Image: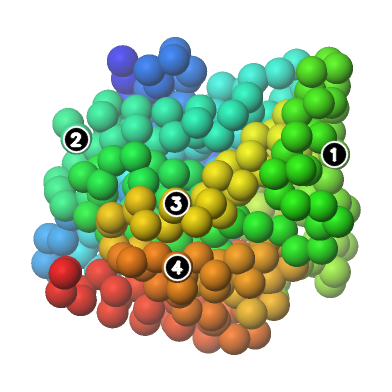
Amino acid sequence: MTDTTPAGGSILCDLEENPIPEGARAGYFLTSDRIRLRYALWPKLDGPRRGTICLVQGRTEFIEKYFETIDDFRRRGFGVATFDWRGQGGSQRLIRNPTVGYVETFDDYVTDLMSFHRNILLPDCPPPFNLVAHSMGGLVALMAAARDRLIFERAFLSAPLLGIDGMPLSTARVASLAEGLGYLGLGSFPVGRGGDDFPSEDRFAGNVLTSDFRRYMVSVEVYAARPDLRVGKPSIKWSAAAFRAMAEVAQFEFAASVKVPVLMLAAARDQVVSTAAIEHMGLSMRTGRHVVIPTARHELFVENDAIRDQVFAAFDAFITEPSG
């Protein structure tokens, strides 16, 4: 089931500093387990018709953060389809405190992606479908690709969440401990680092996400206009689900189960996810590889122009290379 607003309407936040790209269709759809998600579609701009980019976000993110990137893909001849994960952005929140990140299991995010593919991409968007995913979305993308090799032609992953540096225990052990706290009824309690606080102008100097002030401020301005889109620290339950998913993809046999061509970009100065884990996965996959972007922080699509130019050069080369 879907409902749409042809021009985006009030579904999307339109700011002078971050306007909605022209041609938007926005609305809501229900996943197979009846969760209401916000989505938006854009047709390609001038140029060759090359199919559709399915753009999926990281934790705490929202459609409006990617308006600039959406037009970057459209200028390359792609339509763009995107949505907000359950529990964040303009999609249905799952616990009483709407600003705490929560999910029962990362399989629920796979359900979001598969439902979007079935309900929105297949009926409404021109193929072929290529997946572009950031951070948490990259981890979900790999899980989905391992289960259904036909869902996307290729997957381009920006700083995927495959590990976190500096953990005193193994990923599986941290997952078990967090799951234990969930069983004690503490699953909705927030945890996390200072970097998980809401962005603000005075936090830019110490942020670990991007070196670009203008692009950093997009989130600050959108949150000021639409505080309902905000998500801050993750819950214990979200953390348990994330570490369990990371432990799953770290298994030796997982890399061989991904049959879709994959290119993963790692940020050399990433302090959010483990660059070493991305490199390890890139060396382990039969159909995938990785590239490390020098000087970049975590949010590659929100970085400065020089870094973004490298990101899109890698994308252009990957998406046009022969298969097989």
Q: Position of residue 95 (x, y in %)?
A: 71, 18
> Which residue in the structure is indicated by mark 2?
122
Q: Nearer the viewer, mark 2 or mark 4?
A: 4
Q: CA distance from mark 1 to mark 2?
A: 38 Å
The residue that mark 3 highlights is 254
Q: CA distance from mark 3 to mark 1?
A: 29 Å
Q: How busy is the neighbourhood of tag 2: few (under 14 within 10 Å), some, or many (20 plus)?
A: some
- In terms of image quadrants, where is residue 217? bottom right
Q: Amino acid at mark 3?
A: Phe
**In the image, 185: left or right of 296?**
right
Residue underneath mark 4: 284
- Mark 2 and mark 4: Cα distance apart in space: 31 Å
Who's the residue at 31% across and 15% down the image? 1
Residue 105 is labelled as none
Identify residue for label 1.
Answer: 191
User: Disc 4 vs disc 1: Cβ atoms closer than 8 Å?
Assistant: no
Of label 2 and label 3, which has the lower sequence position? 2
- Mark 1, Cα crowd under 10 Å, few <14 / some 14-19 / many 20+, is some
Q: Nearer the viewer, residue 9 or 261?
A: 261
Q: Residues within 10 Å of mark 3 (few under 14, many from 20)?
A: some
Of the residues tagged 3 and 1, which is closer to the observer? 3
- Judged from the image, the secondary structure of the residue bearing numbered disc 4 is helix
Relative placement, left or right, of 35 versus 203 is left
Whether tag 3 and tag 1 are in contact, CB under 8 A, the answer is: no
Q: Residue at x 50, y 31 (%)?
A: 107
Helix, strand or loop at disc 1? loop
Kindly state the secondary structure of the residue where label 2 is placed: helix
Earlier in the chain: of badge 2 and badge 4, it is: 2
